[in-house]
Image (cartoon, grey):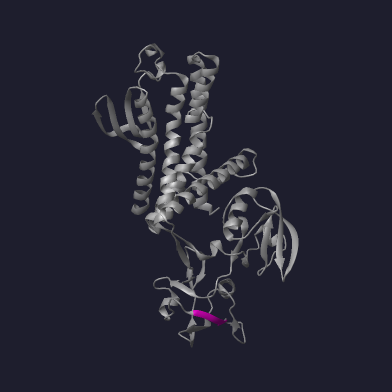
Amino acid sequence: MVHTILAFLILISVLIIFHEFGHFIVAKLFGVKVEVFSVGFGSPIFKKKIGETEYQVAYIPMGGYVKLYGEEDEASYNDPRAFSSKAPWQKILIAAAGPFFNLLIAFIGFTLSFYIGIHQPAFIEQPIKVGYISKKSPFYKAGIKPGDKIVKIDNVPIKTWKDLYIAEIKAVGKTSNVVFERNGHLYKTSITLGKILNQDSIGILPEVPPVVGGLVKNSPASQIGLKEGDKILAIKTYDMTTAEPIKNWYSLTEYLKKNKGNPMTIVIERSNNLIVKDVVPKYSSKLKEYYIGIYPQTKYILKRYPINEAMAQAVNKIKDLTILSIDSMKALVTLHASVLNLSGPISIAQMSGQAAQGGIGEFLGFMAFVSLQLAIINILPIPMLDGGLILLFLIEAVVRKPLSEKFKEYWQKIGIAFVVSLSAVAILSDIIRIFTGV
Protein backbone atom coordinates (compact mmCIF):
# COMPACT_ATOMS: atom_id res chain seq x y z
CA MET A 1 0.00 0.00 0.00
CA VAL A 2 2.76 2.44 0.99
CA HIS A 3 4.70 1.42 -2.10
CA THR A 4 1.70 2.20 -4.32
CA ILE A 5 1.04 5.59 -2.71
CA LEU A 6 4.71 6.56 -2.98
CA ALA A 7 4.88 5.54 -6.65
CA PHE A 8 1.70 7.50 -7.39
CA LEU A 9 2.95 10.64 -5.61
CA ILE A 10 6.28 10.50 -7.46
CA LEU A 11 4.55 10.04 -10.81
CA ILE A 12 1.92 12.74 -10.36
CA SER A 13 4.40 15.22 -8.85
CA VAL A 14 6.87 14.87 -11.73
CA LEU A 15 4.13 15.34 -14.32
CA ILE A 16 2.60 18.35 -12.55
CA ILE A 17 5.97 20.04 -12.06
CA PHE A 18 6.96 19.68 -15.70
CA HIS A 19 3.53 20.71 -17.00
CA GLU A 20 3.49 23.87 -14.90
CA PHE A 21 7.17 24.51 -15.65
CA GLY A 22 6.19 24.68 -19.32
CA HIS A 23 3.76 27.54 -18.60
CA PHE A 24 6.30 29.12 -16.23
CA ILE A 25 9.31 29.17 -18.54
CA VAL A 26 7.43 30.47 -21.62
CA ALA A 27 5.69 33.15 -19.52
CA LYS A 28 9.12 34.23 -18.26
CA LEU A 29 10.42 34.19 -21.83
CA PHE A 30 7.76 36.75 -22.78
CA GLY A 31 8.45 38.87 -19.69
CA VAL A 32 5.32 37.93 -17.75
CA LYS A 33 5.61 38.08 -13.97
CA VAL A 34 4.82 34.70 -12.36
CA GLU A 35 3.35 35.29 -8.92
CA VAL A 36 2.77 31.67 -7.77
CA PHE A 37 4.07 28.26 -8.86
CA SER A 38 1.98 25.61 -7.08
CA VAL A 39 2.19 21.83 -7.06
CA GLY A 40 -1.26 20.79 -5.83
CA PHE A 41 -4.41 22.71 -4.92
CA GLY A 42 -5.75 24.09 -1.66
CA SER A 43 -3.86 25.37 1.36
CA PRO A 44 -0.08 25.15 1.05
CA ILE A 45 1.90 22.62 3.09
CA PHE A 46 5.08 24.45 2.26
CA LYS A 47 5.85 27.71 0.48
CA LYS A 48 8.89 29.85 -0.17
CA LYS A 49 9.32 33.06 -2.13
CA ILE A 50 12.32 33.18 -4.44
CA GLY A 51 12.63 36.40 -6.36
CA GLU A 52 9.21 37.55 -7.49
CA THR A 53 7.64 34.07 -7.45
CA GLU A 54 6.19 32.16 -4.51
CA TYR A 55 6.75 28.41 -4.85
CA GLN A 56 4.44 26.10 -2.90
CA VAL A 57 3.30 22.52 -2.37
CA ALA A 58 -0.40 22.21 -1.52
CA TYR A 59 -2.47 19.51 0.18
CA ILE A 60 -4.42 18.22 -2.85
CA PRO A 61 -1.87 16.66 -5.24
CA MET A 62 -4.28 16.23 -8.18
CA GLY A 63 -2.90 19.05 -10.29
CA GLY A 64 -1.15 22.39 -10.01
CA TYR A 65 -1.07 25.89 -11.40
CA VAL A 66 0.98 28.99 -12.10
CA LYS A 67 -0.59 32.32 -11.25
CA LEU A 68 0.42 35.00 -13.75
CA TYR A 69 0.31 38.69 -12.96
CA GLY A 70 -2.52 40.35 -14.90
CA GLU A 71 -4.15 37.03 -15.78
CA GLU A 72 -7.47 38.09 -14.25
CA ASP A 73 -7.00 41.85 -13.91
CA GLU A 74 -7.62 43.75 -17.11
CA ALA A 75 -6.65 46.97 -15.30
CA SER A 76 -3.02 45.91 -15.74
CA TYR A 77 -3.44 45.77 -19.52
CA ASN A 78 -0.85 48.50 -20.12
CA ASP A 79 1.77 46.95 -17.81
CA PRO A 80 4.35 45.08 -19.96
CA ARG A 81 4.85 42.51 -17.15
CA ALA A 82 1.13 41.63 -17.19
CA PHE A 83 -0.22 38.57 -18.98
CA SER A 84 -3.19 40.63 -20.19
CA SER A 85 -0.85 42.99 -22.06
CA LYS A 86 0.56 40.25 -24.28
CA ALA A 87 -0.44 39.57 -27.88
CA PRO A 88 -2.85 36.65 -28.47
CA TRP A 89 -0.11 34.54 -30.11
CA GLN A 90 2.04 34.93 -26.99
CA LYS A 91 -0.87 33.94 -24.74
CA ILE A 92 -1.47 30.90 -26.95
CA LEU A 93 2.16 29.79 -26.65
CA ILE A 94 2.10 30.22 -22.87
CA ALA A 95 -1.07 28.11 -22.62
CA ALA A 96 0.22 25.46 -25.05
CA ALA A 97 3.55 25.12 -23.24
CA GLY A 98 2.06 22.90 -20.51
CA PRO A 99 0.74 20.20 -22.86
CA PHE A 100 3.91 20.51 -24.96
CA PHE A 101 6.08 19.75 -21.92
CA ASN A 102 3.84 16.76 -21.16
CA LEU A 103 4.44 15.57 -24.72
CA LEU A 104 8.17 16.11 -24.24
CA ILE A 105 8.14 14.07 -21.01
CA ALA A 106 6.21 11.33 -22.83
CA PHE A 107 8.92 11.20 -25.51
CA ILE A 108 11.75 11.15 -22.95
CA GLY A 109 9.97 8.58 -20.77
CA PHE A 110 9.22 6.20 -23.63
CA THR A 111 12.75 6.59 -25.02
CA LEU A 112 14.34 5.75 -21.67
CA SER A 113 11.87 2.92 -21.13
CA PHE A 114 12.75 1.31 -24.47
CA TYR A 115 16.47 1.92 -23.90
CA ILE A 116 16.55 0.53 -20.32
CA GLY A 117 14.24 -2.30 -21.30
CA ILE A 118 10.68 -3.34 -20.54
CA HIS A 119 9.43 -6.80 -19.61
CA GLN A 120 6.51 -8.08 -21.61
CA PRO A 121 4.77 -11.46 -21.88
CA ALA A 122 6.43 -13.55 -24.60
CA PHE A 123 3.07 -14.29 -26.25
CA ILE A 124 2.24 -10.60 -26.89
CA GLU A 125 4.13 -10.58 -30.22
CA GLN A 126 3.23 -14.14 -31.19
CA PRO A 127 0.58 -15.15 -33.77
CA ILE A 128 -2.90 -15.56 -32.31
CA LYS A 129 -3.93 -19.12 -31.65
CA VAL A 130 -6.84 -19.44 -29.24
CA GLY A 131 -5.91 -21.54 -26.22
CA TYR A 132 -8.91 -20.72 -24.06
CA ILE A 133 -12.21 -18.99 -24.71
CA SER A 134 -14.69 -17.81 -22.10
CA LYS A 135 -18.37 -18.57 -22.58
CA LYS A 136 -18.96 -14.85 -21.97
CA SER A 137 -16.67 -13.94 -24.86
CA PRO A 138 -18.19 -12.38 -28.00
CA PHE A 139 -15.81 -14.65 -29.95
CA TYR A 140 -17.38 -17.72 -28.28
CA LYS A 141 -20.84 -16.50 -29.25
CA ALA A 142 -19.56 -16.06 -32.81
CA GLY A 143 -18.44 -19.70 -32.99
CA ILE A 144 -14.70 -19.33 -32.36
CA LYS A 145 -13.13 -22.39 -30.67
CA PRO A 146 -9.80 -23.25 -29.00
CA GLY A 147 -7.22 -23.92 -31.71
CA ASP A 148 -8.65 -21.31 -34.10
CA LYS A 149 -6.43 -18.50 -35.38
CA ILE A 150 -7.74 -14.93 -35.71
CA VAL A 151 -6.67 -13.58 -39.10
CA LYS A 152 -8.49 -10.26 -39.60
CA ILE A 153 -10.86 -7.90 -37.80
CA ASP A 154 -12.66 -5.38 -40.01
CA ASN A 155 -10.17 -6.13 -42.83
CA VAL A 156 -7.22 -5.21 -40.59
CA PRO A 157 -4.65 -8.05 -40.40
CA ILE A 158 -4.24 -9.46 -36.88
CA LYS A 159 -0.72 -10.87 -36.75
CA THR A 160 -0.08 -10.80 -33.00
CA TRP A 161 -1.92 -10.60 -29.67
CA LYS A 162 -0.85 -6.96 -29.51
CA ASP A 163 -2.74 -6.32 -32.75
CA LEU A 164 -5.81 -7.97 -31.23
CA TYR A 165 -5.76 -5.73 -28.13
CA ILE A 166 -5.45 -2.63 -30.32
CA ALA A 167 -8.34 -3.82 -32.49
CA GLU A 168 -10.43 -4.37 -29.35
CA ILE A 169 -10.07 -0.72 -28.32
CA LYS A 170 -11.06 0.47 -31.79
CA ALA A 171 -14.05 -1.86 -31.98
CA VAL A 172 -15.53 -1.28 -28.51
CA GLY A 173 -19.32 -1.10 -28.59
CA LYS A 174 -19.44 -1.97 -32.30
CA THR A 175 -20.11 -4.98 -34.52
CA SER A 176 -16.99 -6.13 -36.35
CA ASN A 177 -16.32 -8.66 -39.10
CA VAL A 178 -13.83 -11.39 -38.20
CA VAL A 179 -11.87 -13.78 -40.40
CA PHE A 180 -10.46 -16.84 -38.63
CA GLU A 181 -8.61 -19.99 -39.62
CA ARG A 182 -9.59 -23.51 -38.55
CA ASN A 183 -7.83 -26.65 -39.80
CA GLY A 184 -6.28 -24.73 -42.70
CA HIS A 185 -9.58 -23.21 -43.90
CA LEU A 186 -10.71 -19.59 -43.60
CA TYR A 187 -14.12 -18.67 -42.19
CA LYS A 188 -16.00 -15.42 -41.65
CA THR A 189 -18.13 -14.38 -38.71
CA SER A 190 -19.05 -11.23 -36.80
CA ILE A 191 -18.70 -10.16 -33.16
CA THR A 192 -20.15 -7.35 -31.10
CA LEU A 193 -17.90 -6.06 -28.34
CA GLY A 194 -19.45 -4.63 -25.20
CA LYS A 195 -19.12 -1.02 -24.12
CA ILE A 196 -16.84 -1.87 -21.19
CA LEU A 197 -13.24 -2.94 -21.70
CA ASN A 198 -12.32 -5.67 -19.22
CA GLN A 199 -11.04 -9.24 -19.09
CA ASP A 200 -14.27 -10.53 -20.64
CA SER A 201 -14.28 -8.01 -23.52
CA ILE A 202 -12.29 -10.41 -25.70
CA GLY A 203 -12.46 -13.49 -23.50
CA ILE A 204 -9.78 -15.42 -25.38
CA LEU A 205 -6.32 -16.26 -24.13
CA PRO A 206 -3.21 -17.88 -25.65
CA GLU A 207 -2.23 -21.48 -25.05
CA VAL A 208 -0.68 -21.91 -21.61
CA PRO A 209 1.09 -25.19 -20.80
CA PRO A 210 0.19 -26.89 -17.47
CA VAL A 211 3.49 -25.95 -15.85
CA VAL A 212 3.62 -24.60 -12.29
CA GLY A 213 4.99 -21.07 -12.30
CA GLY A 214 4.67 -20.48 -8.56
CA LEU A 215 2.90 -21.55 -5.40
CA VAL A 216 0.86 -19.75 -2.78
CA LYS A 217 2.51 -19.94 0.64
CA ASN A 218 0.96 -22.52 3.01
CA SER A 219 -1.39 -23.69 0.26
CA PRO A 220 -2.36 -27.36 -0.26
CA ALA A 221 0.02 -27.52 -3.25
CA SER A 222 2.99 -26.26 -1.21
CA GLN A 223 2.16 -28.66 1.64
CA ILE A 224 2.32 -31.74 -0.63
CA GLY A 225 5.65 -30.62 -2.08
CA LEU A 226 4.76 -29.30 -5.54
CA LYS A 227 7.55 -27.15 -6.99
CA GLU A 228 7.94 -24.42 -9.56
CA GLY A 229 8.56 -26.01 -12.95
CA ASP A 230 6.49 -29.15 -12.28
CA LYS A 231 4.45 -30.15 -15.32
CA ILE A 232 0.99 -31.52 -14.56
CA LEU A 233 0.34 -34.45 -16.89
CA ALA A 234 -2.91 -35.91 -15.59
CA ILE A 235 -5.56 -35.57 -12.91
CA LYS A 236 -8.00 -37.96 -11.25
CA THR A 237 -10.91 -36.53 -9.31
CA TYR A 238 -13.25 -38.38 -6.97
CA ASP A 239 -15.76 -39.18 -9.72
CA MET A 240 -13.25 -40.51 -12.30
CA THR A 241 -12.41 -44.18 -12.80
CA THR A 242 -9.10 -43.34 -14.53
CA ALA A 243 -6.87 -40.27 -14.68
CA GLU A 244 -7.55 -37.75 -17.46
CA PRO A 245 -4.63 -36.17 -19.38
CA ILE A 246 -4.13 -32.41 -18.95
CA LYS A 247 -3.54 -30.62 -22.25
CA ASN A 248 -3.22 -27.07 -20.97
CA TRP A 249 -3.63 -24.90 -17.89
CA TYR A 250 -7.26 -24.11 -18.66
CA SER A 251 -8.37 -27.75 -18.66
CA LEU A 252 -6.64 -28.10 -15.27
CA THR A 253 -8.57 -25.17 -13.79
CA GLU A 254 -11.85 -26.55 -15.19
CA TYR A 255 -11.26 -29.86 -13.41
CA LEU A 256 -10.43 -28.01 -10.18
CA LYS A 257 -13.68 -26.02 -10.35
CA LYS A 258 -15.78 -29.13 -10.95
CA ASN A 259 -14.02 -31.10 -8.21
CA LYS A 260 -14.59 -28.42 -5.57
CA GLY A 261 -13.23 -29.57 -2.19
CA ASN A 262 -12.99 -33.30 -2.86
CA PRO A 263 -9.66 -35.19 -2.63
CA MET A 264 -7.87 -35.58 -5.97
CA THR A 265 -4.77 -37.17 -7.43
CA ILE A 266 -2.39 -35.43 -9.81
CA VAL A 267 0.44 -36.85 -11.92
CA ILE A 268 3.39 -34.54 -12.47
CA GLU A 269 6.65 -34.64 -14.39
CA ARG A 270 9.76 -33.34 -12.65
CA SER A 271 13.27 -33.73 -14.10
CA ASN A 272 11.98 -36.50 -16.43
CA ASN A 273 10.52 -38.41 -13.47
CA LEU A 274 6.84 -39.15 -12.91
CA ILE A 275 5.47 -38.31 -9.46
CA VAL A 276 1.99 -38.97 -8.11
CA LYS A 277 0.55 -36.67 -5.44
CA ASP A 278 -2.74 -36.63 -3.53
CA VAL A 279 -4.15 -33.23 -2.62
CA VAL A 280 -7.26 -31.85 -0.94
CA PRO A 281 -8.34 -28.40 -2.23
CA LYS A 282 -8.95 -25.66 0.32
CA TYR A 283 -11.77 -23.09 0.30
CA SER A 284 -10.82 -19.42 0.04
CA SER A 285 -13.37 -16.98 1.42
CA LYS A 286 -11.58 -14.21 -0.47
CA LEU A 287 -11.70 -15.98 -3.86
CA LYS A 288 -15.02 -17.66 -2.99
CA GLU A 289 -13.82 -20.93 -4.50
CA TYR A 290 -11.66 -23.97 -3.80
CA TYR A 291 -8.00 -23.82 -4.72
CA ILE A 292 -4.78 -25.81 -4.40
CA GLY A 293 -2.50 -22.76 -4.63
CA ILE A 294 -0.62 -22.88 -7.91
CA TYR A 295 -0.39 -20.40 -10.76
CA PRO A 296 0.89 -20.89 -14.31
CA GLN A 297 4.33 -20.24 -15.66
CA THR A 298 4.38 -17.02 -17.68
CA LYS A 299 7.38 -16.34 -19.85
CA TYR A 300 8.56 -12.75 -20.09
CA ILE A 301 11.09 -11.23 -22.44
CA LEU A 302 13.13 -8.07 -21.94
CA LYS A 303 12.77 -5.73 -24.91
CA ARG A 304 15.67 -3.29 -25.22
CA TYR A 305 16.77 -1.00 -28.03
CA PRO A 306 19.85 1.12 -28.83
CA ILE A 307 19.22 4.80 -28.05
CA ASN A 308 18.51 5.81 -31.67
CA GLU A 309 16.02 2.94 -32.13
CA ALA A 310 14.53 3.68 -28.69
CA MET A 311 13.81 7.24 -29.85
CA ALA A 312 12.15 5.95 -33.03
CA GLN A 313 10.09 3.48 -30.98
CA ALA A 314 9.04 6.33 -28.68
CA VAL A 315 7.80 8.41 -31.63
CA ASN A 316 5.82 5.43 -32.98
CA LYS A 317 4.41 4.71 -29.53
CA ILE A 318 3.22 8.31 -29.12
CA LYS A 319 1.65 8.24 -32.59
CA ASP A 320 -0.16 4.93 -31.98
CA LEU A 321 -1.37 5.89 -28.50
CA THR A 322 -2.59 9.28 -29.72
CA ILE A 323 -4.69 7.60 -32.43
CA LEU A 324 -6.06 5.11 -29.89
CA SER A 325 -6.86 7.92 -27.44
CA ILE A 326 -8.76 9.85 -30.10
CA ASP A 327 -10.66 6.69 -31.09
CA SER A 328 -11.50 6.07 -27.41
CA MET A 329 -12.79 9.62 -26.96
CA LYS A 330 -14.92 9.27 -30.10
CA ALA A 331 -16.37 6.05 -28.69
CA LEU A 332 -17.24 7.80 -25.42
CA VAL A 333 -18.84 10.78 -27.15
CA THR A 334 -20.87 8.58 -29.51
CA LEU A 335 -21.88 6.34 -26.55
CA HIS A 336 -20.27 3.26 -28.09
CA ALA A 337 -18.06 2.99 -24.99
CA SER A 338 -19.06 3.20 -21.35
CA VAL A 339 -17.77 5.89 -19.00
CA LEU A 340 -16.71 2.99 -16.77
CA ASN A 341 -13.68 2.72 -19.07
CA LEU A 342 -12.37 5.96 -17.57
CA SER A 343 -9.54 5.63 -15.07
CA GLY A 344 -9.48 7.91 -12.04
CA PRO A 345 -6.82 8.56 -9.41
CA ILE A 346 -7.40 5.22 -7.66
CA SER A 347 -6.75 3.20 -10.83
CA ILE A 348 -3.76 5.36 -11.75
CA ALA A 349 -2.33 4.88 -8.25
CA GLN A 350 -2.77 1.10 -8.49
CA MET A 351 -1.14 0.99 -11.92
CA SER A 352 1.69 3.24 -10.69
CA GLY A 353 2.48 0.74 -7.93
CA GLN A 354 2.36 -2.20 -10.35
CA ALA A 355 4.60 -0.39 -12.84
CA ALA A 356 7.11 0.50 -10.11
CA GLN A 357 7.28 -3.16 -9.04
CA GLY A 358 8.09 -4.09 -12.65
CA GLY A 359 11.24 -1.95 -12.61
CA ILE A 360 12.43 1.48 -13.67
CA GLY A 361 11.75 0.76 -17.37
CA GLU A 362 8.11 -0.11 -16.72
CA PHE A 363 7.63 2.85 -14.38
CA LEU A 364 9.08 5.34 -16.87
CA GLY A 365 6.91 3.83 -19.61
CA PHE A 366 3.78 4.21 -17.50
CA MET A 367 4.76 7.78 -16.56
CA ALA A 368 5.20 8.54 -20.26
CA PHE A 369 1.77 7.04 -21.00
CA VAL A 370 0.03 9.17 -18.34
CA SER A 371 1.94 12.27 -19.46
CA LEU A 372 0.78 11.74 -23.05
CA GLN A 373 -2.83 11.39 -21.88
CA LEU A 374 -2.50 14.66 -19.94
CA ALA A 375 -1.12 16.38 -23.04
CA ILE A 376 -4.00 15.12 -25.20
CA ILE A 377 -6.72 15.99 -22.66
CA ASN A 378 -5.29 19.42 -21.83
CA ILE A 379 -5.09 20.48 -25.46
CA LEU A 380 -8.82 19.81 -26.01
CA PRO A 381 -10.85 23.04 -26.46
CA ILE A 382 -12.67 22.57 -23.16
CA PRO A 383 -13.13 25.42 -20.65
CA MET A 384 -10.72 25.33 -17.69
CA LEU A 385 -8.19 23.32 -19.71
CA ASP A 386 -5.27 24.77 -21.67
CA GLY A 387 -7.07 24.02 -24.93
CA GLY A 388 -10.03 26.08 -23.73
CA LEU A 389 -7.74 29.05 -23.09
CA ILE A 390 -6.14 28.65 -26.50
CA LEU A 391 -9.59 28.74 -28.09
CA LEU A 392 -10.40 32.00 -26.25
CA PHE A 393 -7.13 33.58 -27.37
CA LEU A 394 -7.77 32.49 -30.96
CA ILE A 395 -11.20 34.15 -30.83
CA GLU A 396 -9.58 37.32 -29.45
CA ALA A 397 -7.06 37.22 -32.30
CA VAL A 398 -9.88 36.99 -34.85
CA VAL A 399 -12.11 39.72 -33.36
CA ARG A 400 -9.02 41.80 -32.45
CA LYS A 401 -10.24 42.73 -28.98
CA PRO A 402 -10.43 41.08 -25.54
CA LEU A 403 -13.55 39.07 -24.79
CA SER A 404 -15.90 40.46 -22.16
CA GLU A 405 -15.38 39.54 -18.51
CA LYS A 406 -18.97 38.26 -18.34
CA PHE A 407 -18.32 35.80 -21.20
CA LYS A 408 -15.09 34.61 -19.56
CA GLU A 409 -16.93 34.13 -16.28
CA TYR A 410 -19.58 31.92 -17.93
CA TRP A 411 -16.86 30.08 -19.84
CA GLN A 412 -15.01 29.36 -16.61
CA LYS A 413 -18.17 28.17 -14.82
CA ILE A 414 -18.88 25.73 -17.66
CA GLY A 415 -15.31 24.49 -17.41
CA ILE A 416 -15.48 23.99 -13.65
CA ALA A 417 -18.74 22.05 -13.99
CA PHE A 418 -17.28 19.86 -16.74
CA VAL A 419 -13.99 19.11 -14.96
CA VAL A 420 -15.70 18.38 -11.62
CA SER A 421 -18.26 16.12 -13.32
CA LEU A 422 -15.59 14.25 -15.31
CA SER A 423 -13.46 13.78 -12.18
CA ALA A 424 -16.45 12.51 -10.24
CA VAL A 425 -17.32 9.99 -12.97
CA ALA A 426 -13.70 8.77 -13.13
CA ILE A 427 -13.55 8.29 -9.35
CA LEU A 428 -16.95 6.56 -9.38
CA SER A 429 -15.68 4.25 -12.14
CA ASP A 430 -12.70 3.35 -9.95
CA ILE A 431 -14.96 2.56 -6.99
CA ILE A 432 -17.33 0.44 -9.12
CA ARG A 433 -14.37 -1.55 -10.49
CA ILE A 434 -13.08 -2.19 -6.96
CA PHE A 435 -16.40 -3.50 -5.63
CA THR A 436 -17.74 -5.28 -8.73
CA GLY A 437 -14.60 -6.31 -10.60
CA VAL A 438 -15.99 -4.83 -13.84
Residue 285 falls left or right of residue 256? left
Query: Which quadrant of the figure has residue 237?
Result: bottom right
Residue 165 on the magenta span: no
Main secondary structure found in the magenta portion: strand
Q: Is residue 212 visible?
A: yes
Residue drawn at the location 24% of the way across and 28% of the way down: 49
Which residue range is magenta in the image? 231-235
Kindly identify the residue that appears in the image at 46 percent across and 25 percent down: 92
Q: Residue at coordinates 55% horizontally, 15% vertically from top-left?
A: 399
User: Is 388 displayed left or right of 241 in the figure?
Assistant: left
Expressed as whole percent of the image width and height from the top left, the position of residue 416 reads 48, 28
Task: Place residue 37 in its image quadrant.
Answer: top left
User: In terms of depth relative to the viewer, which is nearer, 424 or 117?
Assistant: 117
* Residue, far front: 308
Task: Specify whether 290 is left or right of 65.
Answer: right
* Residue 352 appears anywhere in the view: no
* Residue 28 location (% of width, % of height): 34, 26
Residue 37 against residue 290 in the figure, above or below: above
The answer to whether 284 is drawn above or below residue 272 in the figure is: above
Q: Name which residue lies at 43% across and 39% down.
A: 102
- Quadrant of the rendering where the N terminus is positioned: bottom left
